[in-house]
Image (spheres, coloured by chain):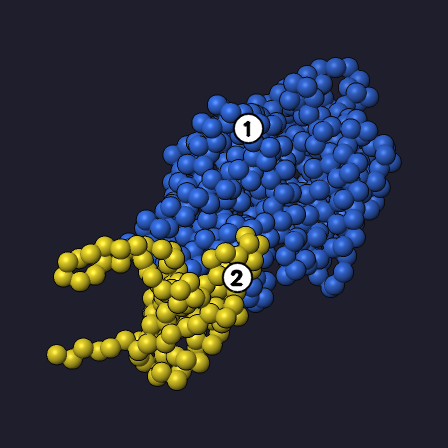
Chain colours: A blue, B yellow
Amino acid sequence: MELDDRLFRREAGRMVSALTRIFGVHNLALAEDVVQDAFCRALEVWGMRGAPDNPSAWLMTTARNRALDVLRRQRTAKTFAPELGRLLDSEWTLAPLVDEILAADAIQDSMLRMMFSCCHPRLSEPAQVALILNILCGFSVDEIASAFTSGHAAVEKRIMRGKKVLAESKRLFDTTVPADFSGRLPGVHRALYLLFNEGYHGASPAASVRLELCNEAIRLIAALLQHPLAMTPTTYALAALMTLTAARLPARTDSCGNLIALFEQDRTLWDRTRLDDGMRLLELSASGPELTAYHIEGAIASVHAMARRADDTDWSRIISLYDSLMRINGSPIVALNRAIAIAQRDGPERGLAAIEAIANPDRLAGYPFYPAALGELELRHGNPERARAHFEEALARARNPMERRFFEQRLAACEVPNARATVAQFWESGLDASQTDDEEEAAPSA
Amino acid sequence: MSEFTFLFRGRDQSASPDQMQKTMQKWVAWFKELNANGCIKYPGHPLEPTGKVVSGKAKAVHDGPYAEAKDVVGGYMLIEARDLAHAVEISKGCPILDVAGSVEVRPVQIMNM
């Protein structure tokens, strides 16, 4: 991606949020137009004279001047943010107020207001995530469609409907009312969690897209953690989970974009800074009585993070964490993960038994890593014939080229005599701790 | 509730950008307070110190206004208040008073023909 693209994407969310604070949420499209204008202007001017020393400031100043134009020209015809009342109508206050809202601290606050607004309870979770990506992360409809492997039209409709709901809500979410803030916070957590998972486990075949989704989720949760009311153990737990998991990203795919299973990853490639950050965040999450799924998933990620070699993994600890997770979220995918951990500790036979014991396995019907897990354990148990049948089933359910390649590789392993010794652990590919209820996410939204 | 016009005089047009900034912040704070209290009927505008004066049947045009700098109207706004005393009370928050300026408080005249 071009430098400009990355810069524009990063700035778009800040600029749109701040301008919406001024124009009012019902004029979101106007804010987007002003930002688009600033970007076009930048391409024009920078193309001729080169980029300025501080491109972000340049963009913001350009947007500011354009916004002042719009406000002056349209203030008699339009109403802007209702909370600013008549202050935008007057030259006494117009420019100073706009500058106040475009100051760095205020922008941070506006972004949070936008984030909370996007998580409106009237919107489906996929719509919330799409809106966040579009408004706060500057992803185009096409980019979102490709990240979610959905059609352009479907994503566009989802976003348009979402923006309509935003517009009808009259004003941006007020982040200063503690009760409202705490009420909406779990929805925000959930949307960021989904955004992160879409990046980490998602369907997009392009590793770069997925990496970006993970980075965006981490950037947004870091912004969230700037707000005193958001500094809860649960937010820290979610941030820890994301950061510890994302630390493994550099080792997770090879140069061709193929998945590398957790046990085969070169752990020296893991991002030390993120691991340290993640452990620090996990410590911060350990206060108060609340134990959420994020806490447990973060703890599982930390157990992996602490094992310098795959063989050093503390499986008993992981199994007991999955037991806790089962009590909070007894989804079959969590149960499947738990079964894999049991296989790691007690051997494939016990793992297979644990998989068989999963309640309502029909919920795993479309999930390719369910047959893949069976195949893997059968292979290790010395039954390549049975393993092959399972992997063929997994291949038939593969959702993207990356998964397809992975299952083909597993099928090939069934042909290798004594495959047991070379078997790749597939933990990382789909049975990762943080993927707990993928089948719900995969369900098409209304 | 009645309407009153505030005429501001004695704006310091020669202040340094830094002072200007501080002064503007005070004005914004005052306007926000008035806005929150629902006192603003129309927020008006600041006015440039120069312009033209058109006068008499001859419609003579002169550079104006002629007044001393401290007497030039530097801006206006319309507010809503219970009565003149209340309007005067409101005017006392105006930052122009900090720089030795003045606020002229004038009730809007209701013309009952």
Q: Quadrant of residue B79?
A: bottom left
* The disc label shown at residue A51, or none: 1
Frontmost of labels 2 and 1 is 2
Quarter holding the C terminus of chain A is top left
Residue corresponding to mark 2: B23
Residue drawn at 36 percent across, 55 percent down: B50
Residue B1 drawn at (x, y percent)? 32, 80
**Observer-nearest of A258 and A111:** A111
User: Callout 1, which amino acid?
Assistant: Ala
Q: Is residue B52 above or below residue A127?
A: below
Residue A51 drawn at (x, y percent)? 55, 28
**Observer-nearest of A87 and A40:** A87
Is residue B52 something one can see in this rendering? yes
Q: Is disc 1 on the same chain as disc 2?
A: no
Q: CA distance from mark 2 to mark 1?
A: 34 Å
Residue drawn at 37 percent across, 71 percent down: B6
Chain containing mark 1? A
Q: Is residue A189 left or right of residue A49?
A: right
User: Callout 2, which amino acid?
Assistant: Thr
Quarter holding the N terminus of chain A is top right
